[in-house]
Each structure stands twice: as C-alpha cells, then as structure tokens.
Image: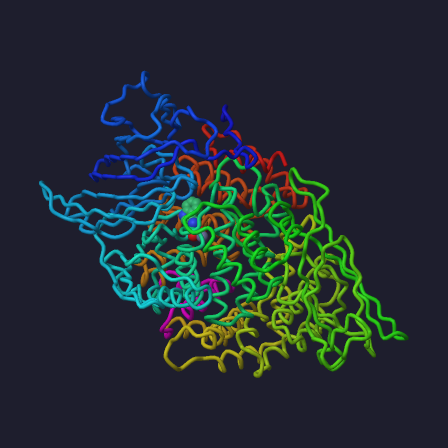
Amino acid sequence: MRTNQPTTIRLSEYKVPAHLVDAVDLRFELFDNGARVHSTLTVRRNPESAEEFAPLELDGDSLKLEQVILDGRELMAGNDYDETGAQLVIARVPAQFELTVVTWIEPQNNTRLEGLYKSSGMFCTQCEAEGFRCITYFPDRPDVMARYRTRIEADKASCPVLLSNGNDVDRGDLEGGRHFVTWEDPFPKPSYLFALVAGDLVEKQDTFTTCSGREIDLRIFVEPRNAAKCQHAMDSLKRSMRWDEEVYGREYDLDIFMIVAVDDFNMGAMENKGLNIFNSSCVLASQETATDLAFQRIESIVAHEYFHNWSGNRVTCRDWFQLSLKEGFTVFRDSTFSADMGSPTVKRIEDVTLLRTAQFAEDAGPMAHPVRPASYMEISNFYTLTIYEKGAEVVRMIHTLLGPELFRKGSDLYFERHDGQAVTTDDFVKAMEDASGRDLTQFRLWYDQAGTPVLTVSDVYDSERGVYSLKIQQAIPDTPGQTNKKPQHIPFALGLLGAEGEALPLRLVSTEDAASAPTERVLELTKASHTFEFHGLTQKPVPSLLRHFSAPVRLVYPWSREQLVFLMSHDPDGFNRWDAGQRLAVDVIQSLVDSSGTVDIDSRLVEAYRTLLADRTLDQALVAKMLHLPSEAYLIELADSPDVAAIHRTREQVLSHLATSLRDELVACYHRNMDDGEYEVTPESVARRSLKNTALAWLLMINDNTGRDLALQQLREADNMTDRMGALRALVNSDYAEERSQALADFYEHFQSDPQVVEQWFSVQASSDRAGQLPQIQALLKHPAFDWKNPNKIRSVIGVFAGQNLAAFHNPDGSGYSFLADQVCRLDDSNPQIAARLVAPLTRWKKFAPAYSALMRTALERIRNKAELSADLYEVVHKSLEA
Ligand code: TRP
Ligand code: ZN
C-alpha cells in the first residue's frame, strides 16, 4: 500500500506567486536516446507578493538536473540550491535575475504522455495541466505568464519538421546532419500552453482572411499516410474562425495557426498557443474511414480548441480551481457553434443526453464536486463532465437570463477587461453583471455547490377562476463534504398546451392581455418553493416544462402516459417532444422491471413509435433521435439500487417487442432512407443514414432474415463508414453468429492498416453483449493490433467494455469488476491518468444493488492495496471507498 498520501491542494490557500517570469528562452537538443533542455528564465520578484525574501521555487518531475547558472555563476547543489523530488529551491535570489537550468529527459521512455514524449517516432508535448515540469524546472502554474522563444535542434532526416508556438524566426543547418528552427511567441502565456513537435510530417496548407483583412496561414501536420484525411478538419477550422468573428467578435491574433495529429494522446486535443495538438481520432477523417458521428465530433473539437485561443489563452485561469472558466465557457461556445452548423434541437438532445447520463451520475457519486472545486489532490482527475458539461450549462443559464445581446456585451467586456490576464470564474460572472446590470450573487452558488438540483412540480387547475397554478420546489442533495445547501437561481422555461395542442398565452396576472402574452416564458426560481398562477384558462392545460432543458436539474412531475404521448406529437419545443418520448419509454421499461415482466408492454409506446416512423413532416433528424430508446446507462442512472441484468433484459425485451410489432414499418423506413446520391455530411443525410441504420439494428434484434440480407448487402456495397459500421454493428448484435464472425474478420482484413478504424472495430465488439463477453475481451487484449501504450486502444476495448457493455461488465459473478481492477493496476504503472479515468465505473459501487456493490467494493480495495499507487489513482480510489 502507498505509504505517503498525496497532499490536498486547497483554493482557500491560494497565494500569488512570489516570483514572475517575463521571458523564457528554450533550447532543445533532441536525440534518439534522450533530450537536453536548456532553459533561461528572466525572473523578477512579484511586487504583489507579501513574501519579500521568498526563495525561488521551481517545479520539476522526472528530470535529471545537469546545471544551474544564476546571472552567469554556476550554482552548487546543497550549497546554493536544493533539489527535492518535486522542486528545485534556490534560497537566496536577487530581486531580478537570469537563471539557466539544463536538464536531461528521456522522451522515448515517457509512457505517461505528459511533458515531452514520442508517438510513432515523432516528438510531441502535452503540458496541461502540469506537464511542463516534466520538461524543465519552472514555476508551473497558470498565473505565471511569460514570453517564449524556443530553438529546436534535431536530426534533419528523421525530424525534418520542427514546430513550436508562435512564428518561426530563424532556421538553419548544423553539423552531423542536424538542423534547427527557432520559434517566437509574442503573447505571454502560462507554461501549460507550451508545445513542441518534431518529426517526419506532411502538411495540408490553406489560408483564412480575417474580418480585418489579415491573411492567416493555416497548416495541418500529419504522418504521410494520413495526408488525405485533413480536409474536413481544415474546413471545420475555417468555419470556426468565421463563426468566432461573427458571434463573439473574436479575431485570430498570430499569423499562423497549426494543428498536429498524434496517435498516442491522453485526451481529445489540446489548445497550445498557435499549435494545437490533436488525438488522431479527433482530426483525421475520410468518407471511407470515419462515421458521421466522427465527422461531427471532429468539427466540434477543432472548434473547441480554436475557441480556446480567446477563452483560455488570451484570457487564462488564475489557478486550476478555475478550470471551468475556460472549459465550461469553451464547451458552451463549441456547442452553440455546432448547433448553428447543424440542427440546434438535435445538438441540444445530444448534450443533454450526455449530461443526464454521465454528469448527473458523477454529481451523485463519490467524486461529486462543484464547477469550481474547493480542493483536489491530482488536477488531472478534475477534467470532468462537471467542469466541462455542467460548466457549459452554467454559462448557458447566464445566456438565458441575460438574453443574447446582454450576454454578448458581457463577453466583450470580459475579453477586453481581462486580455492577457489569469483570472477566476468570479471575474467572468462580474463582467456579465457589469455589462447587464443584473445581480448574479445568488447565481454564483452554481459554481460552489455540487449536486444536481431536484425540481418537484405539482399543479392544480381552478375551473371557477380559470387559474392554473404550478408549484415548483427545489432541493439539492448532499454530496461529499457538502450538506444543507441553499436554493439556487434557476431559469425555468415553460409553455402550456391546450387540448388541440395549441400554445396557450401565459398570463401571470389576470389583467394581462391574452393577445400580447407570450406562449413561452422563463420563470426565475430563487427560493425553495414558488407558486406561479396562470390566468384566463378555460381548461386544464398540458404543461411543457423545462423547455430546451433550461437548467441542469432533475425534473419530477407526475406525467400521465396520455400527456407524454400528447407532448410527443404536439409540443412546439422539439427538445421537449423528444424528452416526452424518453420519459414514456423510461416509464414503460421501469414498470416492467419493477413488476418482473408481469405487466404487458404498453401499446401506447408501440403506437407512438409507429406514428414517428410514419411521420414525414417532422424534422427527420429529430425523428432519428426519438427512435433511440433510453440507454441502459441512463436507465441505471435513474434507478435506485439498479439490478443491471434485469434492466438489460427488459430493455432488450421492449426493443424486440417494438421491432416485432413495427417490422413492416421498419423495412419501409429502411428502403425510404436508402441514399443513392453523393455522400455528404448534412443534417438531412446524416438523419437518413441514422434512420436507416436504426431500422436495420431493430430488424436484426428479432433475427429477421430480410434485415440480415439488407445488412450483408449494405456491408458489401456501402461507400462510407457510417453505413458499413451500421451494418457491422447490427450483425454483431444479432444472433447470426456465423455472419457476425465473417463480417468482423472481413472488416479487419480490409481496414487493419488504419488505426482509427481498428479502434472502431474494437469498440463495436467490446460494447456488444454478443461479441464482448469477458473471454472475448481477454482475446481482444491479445490481438496484434492492441497496444498497451496507446490510450485509444485501451479505451476502445477496456473503457468501452466497462462503460457501455453493462450487462457483461456487471456479471453477477464479479468477473467484470475483477478484470477491470487488474487492468487498472497494470496501467497505473505506465499511464496513471488513463488508469484513474478507467476506474470510474467501479467508483459508483454504492449505487448498485447489494450483490453487485459488495463485489465492486472488493475490486476497489484490491486496487487500493496495490504497491506504488499513483496520486491520480490514489485520489479516486480512496475518495470512492471513503465517501
Ligand atoms: N485543455 C484540453 C481541452 O481542450 C484538455 C486536455 C488535453 C487535457 N490534454 C490533456 C487535460 C491532458 C489534462 C491532461 O479540453
Ligand atoms: Zn477545452
């Protein structure tokens, strides 16, 4: 067991840095067996620090220190400086000085993928959050902002391309077949935004003319074999640049913007100044190899990283407690961008699905934390759905409360006031307040209180007075370390529908004129309980509550199934139509689970889906979403003490019942949506493919031979990956065992040289209860294409198994848990960030029915007892066992 526990860092203990760095001059000598890093810092005492004689403290991790020179004088270890494990401390320093530090590092042995490492032969970096300290000694905190000049020296043949942040200002040849390039970044930045890339890369080049007429050089660097897969990312980049000018008034600042694709990467992508580094799977795409989902994901991630140039880089975070300042805001920005590029309703459905399935689960679990956490042990563990997705919802609520014009005034003020600074979430809210004149004091609780608020709504209709009253109560559940929470400020959008589906005027006072009263309002909840009266109603309306999901809350209202069916076909808010369908399906499935399958499947569900399949007037992208039953993960999240096997069985039973009852409609839907035109990624054609592939999946659920033949034909004839994958997935999840193995083998044979496709091939098996039982998962780990050093492969087998193949993972014999514990322990030694993420499904042990939770706990305890537990894994495992 780990003897020294990692320290807890607290927001309340924040102190301004004692020293500031104005300039960093770096020289990298890159070799096969390691790299020498020469760093010269221009340092001065921080006038705002109270500690006048503070020692200079620089962070370092896994460095071999070779030399320290202060103002030209070489310092002696022990005498002049101390090197503890994690810091270089120089006790006596002048008020202003130049410090040179020389370190030796071994990128080729860096499996953590933090700092400088090698991926498929190329050198690359990942410095957020605390990776720069793995490169050289430095005050590695975001409130130390410096100007960087970086000279890279390497072998010219193996590393013809040498990149860093900013503009290249010098280049030339060196002895021994080596060469160098020098880069200069004119914008002061925190160390986490530093980047370096050196390798044998080809580039795709384009230009963008900004709103003020400047021409920006755009380049995407990839390995030669991927040269033809950059067009979509380039187009996405140009759309993002235009959108940020039009919607936020933000123009790009440097003369060049670069993206590099690397295969081994812990996360999706990284917004390093002028040199974004991407996980290959988040940038490379072609019609033959990427699904529609991948195309959309790439567009939104390219946008996300690009938008960080203002929300993150020009204005950055004071400390890591403020992470949501850049991430929540930037997710809000990329989500609005994607909504504008495609279907806003569909984008909202996707965002809310992720939030309700995964963020609500996190908020109800042992790692629950506020959007601005008060403490952490390992910051990498706080790149969470709460920081990103709930953080984006919080910004979205400000947008709803202020309206688009005042919100824009607020963001303009924020960017102008804080340009070049490292600031807090409070500074963001303050700018919104100052620009709008609104008081957001109570609203700030969204940043401090963890847990998902529960809104319980009840209603009465008084026919004599013609008044409909809605009572809305809010309560916020306790979370680790937080009880007795205060009511939050919640924007609550709603409408009321009459018997024919007409939108009724919402008159909050009886004197209000019906003709001018709006049919949708945003009520503002600030107290534990409110009652709102709506006047002049001649009948009890059907309420359409929390439209567009106007706040990240759980909504409890006693819907009848008639009301839900009614809303599914009448609600003018597309999001709530979809939500009504989800609630109906959840209700049907839950009552079957509760009755152990003794009640009949409600025919209203079948008829509602029949209507949907026949509806040709409704947006087909919305229909495609509405046809997806709530996921197992969501059903589990909604249940207390879920019995996973029962939920899985019941959901499959409902699916087969629907497929059997609607068989002819499904075949018709398939044929109607067979595309004969050119492949394009427009909302309409994506919807057609989605409808077609859903129909196919349902037909194969019931082992329909027509469905099987259609799938085989589609697999042979498809000209794009969405259709190939749709057919493969349907076959893999069917009982046609022979066709399944043949299809999987053929597919691999065809695509084995493409890592992104192989990852999809792994996931389709790992997520299937037919092809992804534990012995088959074990076999995938032995497959030649599996690679323990590649996070994407790990995620596509182990992560997908534990996160999506829930019945197999929660096998009542505990084998899934014990398997995951083994893999997590193994990975902790090579890549602790990945290990700590992978363990998440086990940390929810308390939620499950006792038979499951005892076994999950045992698996967690085994991880806790592992020798040399990383700080990353220590924090997650201990918090989940002790919560
Ligand atoms: N800032 C990145 C983003 O755009 C997140 C990120 C990329 C990251 N790589 C990382 C965070 C490594 C922690 C560790 O969201
Ligand atoms: Zn981000």
Residue situated furthest top in the rendering: 79
The residue positioned 37% from the left and 48% from the top of the image is: 265
Residue 719 is inside the magenta segment? yes
Determine whether, in the image, residue 447 is placed left or right of residue 541: left
| Residue 779 appears in view | no
The residue positioned 45% from the left and 28% from the top of the image is: 868
Q: How many marks?
A: 0
The residue positioned 50% from the left and 33% from the top of the image is: 15
In the image, residue 764 lies at what x, y percent? Answer: 45, 59
The residue nearer to you, when weighing 33 against 396, is 396
**Height in image: 534 above or below 370?**
below
Residue range corresponding to the magenta coloring: 717-746
In the image, residue 66 lies at what x, y percent? Answer: 25, 26
Residue situated furthest right in the rendering: 464
Query: Which secondary structure type mostly characterizes the magenta part of the structure?
Result: helix
The residue positioned 58% from the left and 71% from the top of the image is: 627
In the image, residue 412 lies at what x, y percent? Answer: 48, 59
In the image, residue 794 lies at what x, y percent? Answer: 42, 47
The residue nearer to you, when weighing 234 against 39, is 39
Which color scheme is applied? rainbow
Quadrant in the rendering for residue 23: top left
| Residue 584 appears in view | yes
Residue 728 is inside the magenta segment? yes
Picture quarter with the C terminus: top right
The residue nearer to you, when weighing 335 against 554, is 335
Quadrant in the rendering for residue 401: bottom right
**Height in image: 22 above or below 223?**
above
